[in-house]
Amino acid sequence: MSGRWGATGLWLALLLFPLAASFSGSALFLQDIGATVLLTAIGACAWNVVGGYAGQVSVGHAIFFGTGAYASLAVYTLWQLPPVAGLPLAVGLAMLIAALIGLPTFRLQGHYFSMATLAVAELIRLLVSNWDMLGAAIGIQGPATPRGWWDIVYRSPVPYYYIDLAVLAALLAATRRMTRSRFGFYLRAIRSGERAARSLGVPVRRIKLLALMFSAGFAAVAGALYALKVGFVNPESGLGILVSVQMIITAALGGAGSLYGPLVGAIILVPLQSVSNTWFGGSGSGLTYILYGGIIMLLARYEPGGLAEWWHRRLAPRLKRTPAESEHVRSAA
Amino acid sequence: MSMARSLAAALVAALAAAGTASAADAVKIGVIYPLSGNAANAGKSALEAVRLAAEIVNDPHPELSPLPLAGGSGLPNLGGAKIEIVSADHQGNPAEGQSQTLRLITQDKVAAVIGAYQSNVTFTATAVAERYGVPFIIGDSVALNIMARGFQWVFRTTPVASDFAANYMAFFNDMNKAGHKVTSVAVVNENTDYGTSVATTLLEQAAAHGLKVVAQIAYSANSTDVSAQVLQLKDKKPDGVVFVSYTADAILYLKTMKNLDYLPPMMIGDDSGFSDPTFVPSVGSIAQGVMNRSAWDVGKPGSVTYKIDQMFRQRTGHAMDDTSARDMQAFFVLAEAINRAGSTDPAKIQAALRATDLKHEQLMMGYRGVKFDKTGQNTEAATYLIQLQGSDYVAVWPPQFSSAPLQWPMRGWK
Amino acid sequence: MILLQATVSGLLLGAVYALFSCGLTLIWGMMNFINFAHGEFVMLGMYAALLATWAGLGPAFFAPGAAIALFALGAIVYLGVIKQVMRGPMLAQILSSFGLALLLRYTAFFVFKSDFRTLPESELSGTLHLFGLYIARAQLLAGAAAALLAFAMHMLLTRSALGSRMLAVAEDRQAAMLMGIRPDRMQTLAWGLSAASAGVAGALMAIAYPFSPAVGETFALTAFVVVTLGGFGSVPGAMIAGFVIGLVEALAAYLIGPVYKDVVVYAIFVAVLWVRPQGLLGASAR
């Protein structure tokens, strides 16, 4: 983003959006979309840490999202605990799985990691689909009516909106801190060229692993927040490939490897999907994913840095910007 | 009459007319189905069926008169108000179902909602209706967990897996009494939520009806090869096999059974794949006598159901199918309740739905009637059993509703 | 007896896996590029066969038709997209083929709908009764043809002049250029060949098994497992691994349960990554 004013303005707008929406006839619907935008942004920002900053392209991030959703609803279904109580379990499990995927694959070429994320996502989806304790193919649900404030079940989307906003802010703050630290420096070095980085003494494997675990943990939180809002998860909505695709395209469109890119991507894509659904009703017939595929290809071919890159190249030179804020590094093959 | 009086009379008449006109504001009903994605065909068909039902209520159709509200124009107790359909597409996604139902209720301000085909979407959509206190009627989704949450605003007219399973086992018992030996059964089911939940209830009902389950074979719906499963069946020799399959697997099983020369005395397919338009053209010639279930039967020419089928064909170009028919029936039940309530107030509609008591003659489906229990489930829901004879399925059970004699054992390809 | 039956089915399907995995490993070896859309090439081969039946053509046309169509597609994809992204970051490379996979898959869903289809009955239908086993004629044909074609591909690569040129580019691009070989042209051919072999595998499978646009995703994963097990860039490795995976799948289906066959295959994949990432015949994968 160009400068502090842009960022401040954005956060102010996000903070006040539900209030502004409440004056419209479609208040609740708009607030619901707002909550969905933030939820999508959290998932995409989480993916961005490992896919954008570290340059390790995970195409199976649904694993971690799904872990978060299932863990929180499982503690409710099995032990009648409030779903939030499942959060530590969710994050811990996600990080464990991340380590299990990362340890063997990070010492190999990047392709192995990507293939592994796809395979493990499918593996876990199939296992869960046949595991009765987790609802098998039917899925599991959350509390239908709240037993207390701790169940976090609300009629209105507004509480969810602010919870999501708080988590997003925390994630972005943590990400920003990370990029400015030595860890961030190492990540950029790895992205520019692994061999060179290794020869300079960067502990490549460890850094990649830590980035993945961080990313996985936050993706699990996104999953848990989704489970709280929707109150239901099944193998397809929690662990399906479209979950992973959504994270990737949201981050890539806005700018993988940039701080606000995924949020911008979410602000554009989520309302677009909803609007086209409401206006055209059924004539979509699956055009959304054809379009997503096309957009991803075009981005890859012409502008891998997404909108953030385009912004920096076309518009930022006219606005004052310090070197420290150019988060984005483009590396050659 | 004096001038003043005639003017007054005219004024009163005009006011009365205006009053009637304003009392006849359209009643909005939200309709949410998958209009894109995998189930788009089914969703669009359901939407058309509901639209046809709205037309039948709104315009006079005296030829369909046993159906409530078909004879007149609009809803009589609401001053002839017409029904207006507001449709939404949930794309098969539970989160989108939640979001779109929210839109229908808070933005379009519908009086009631009908939907949603896929059970997992119906699950989240009904939760929204419950939270906002708006009646939601389900014509098609059969998952048991939908009605198990203690909700007060959700009603379901369709029979569910336990009803079907009970029907199949009762049928087997009837066959046994009629002299055909049926003491053992096998269940073959695909392993997603549909197949698994139906299989569970089949096992329960088999036990309840004193039938021995000699095999339960779960398989993945997109298997490319089912020879192992068929060989297992050949080994166990059940007297009847119930299949819970989608289209490709149903077709694959029949072909594999012919290749491996295995034909059970009777096969019952639990709708889905066995009712798909491509099933009969693909394997009809080798699946003669296979049974299926349907709460919808076209019936004899001149009957109400026959006429509805004709109207549906004109609208969509294809015949009425069981699922769309069930959705249409649910809509009629809803309209009848709104009429009885005489108002669009949600609480009044809810009370009217609870008091619903329709008889078989007032329905287009094969249900015994419509009466909701305290969870909102229709306890009079039932299904016919149909059998493939030639290139059509015909109703063969229960005997009082059958239109053709039952063929036992099934002929298959022989 | 059922065990033997499962073994035979597994090997026949494994031959098809071997055929379509060869192309994936060829590209990987030559360009260090994993094509996430490879499974969709197989799926499109199946639909090419379907279109051939709609056009009234017989089974003899399925494989050649698929080969030509997919060869063209592969070459176009390389020239239009892949060539350029190879110069960019890893993210762009992976996203380009992943995006292509989505595009092809959902276009197929849009055009053909999600129903599973089978090809109409023909002279290839029916079962053979050999040695007490029931073998579907179509499966036998598919397996035998796939095995022959995979072998032919291996011969083409190792024995022909064209093949040596392609392998030279794989081994050392700079040296190949110095020898007057045009890497670009070889890579275009390799993409065409890879896509064509995937398409033919699909067309052969379509004769024997039902298909839908969703199967591309599963085949992509199967191909990944096969090429990883076979070893980075090794076509013979992919061939052997193809048979192994086909066999494992069939035995897992029979011994553990049909729903778990994919689980076992993916679990093997993860195990290979942990224990022996270079696979059976591959060079070091670092």
Image (cartoon, coloured by chain):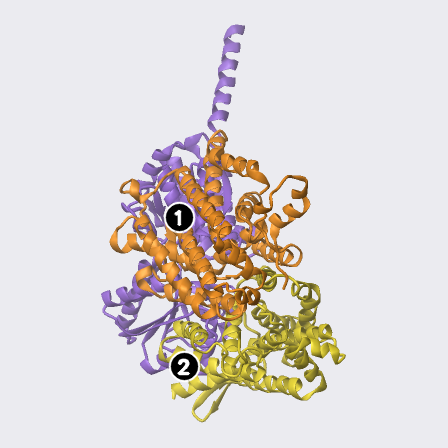
Chain colours: A orange, B purple, C yellow
Front position in the image: B46 or B62: B46
Q: Which residue, given by chain and number where applicable, does mark 1 sit on?
A: A225
**Residue at horizontal 36%, vertical 66%?**
A130
- Three-letter code, disc 2: Leu
Front position in the image: C159 or A314: A314
Q: List x then y, in percent, for residue B162.
A: 31, 59
Query: Tag 2, which chain?
Result: C
Location of residue C179 with respect to B61 vertically, above or below = below
**Residue at horizontal 62%, vertical 58%?**
A300
Marks 1 and 2, how far apart at CA: 41 Å
Looking at the rendering, in which quadrant would you find the N terminus of chain C?
bottom left
Q: Which residue, given by chain and number where applicable, does mark 2 sit on?
A: C251
Left/right placement of residue C114 relative to residue C274 reads: right
Left/right placement of residue C47 relative to residue B63 reads: right
- Three-letter code, disc 1: Leu
Query: Tag 1, which chain?
Result: A
| Residue A192, picture quadrant | bottom right
**Residue at horizontal 47%, vertical 65%?**
A205
| Residue A193, picture quadrant | bottom right
Q: List x then y, in percent, for residue C221.
A: 50, 70
Query: Are the residues flagged by discs 1 and 2 from a single subunit?
Result: no
Q: List x then y, in percent, for residue A115.
A: 51, 68
Disc 2 crowd rating (10 Å Cα; few below 14, some 14-19, many 20+) is: many
Location of residue B121 with respect to B75 vertically, above or below = below
Nearest to the eye among marks 1 and 2: give it: 1
Q: Which residue sits furthest right?
A: C180
Circle 1/circle 2 CB separation < 8 Å: no
Q: List x then y, in percent, for residue A304.
A: 62, 56
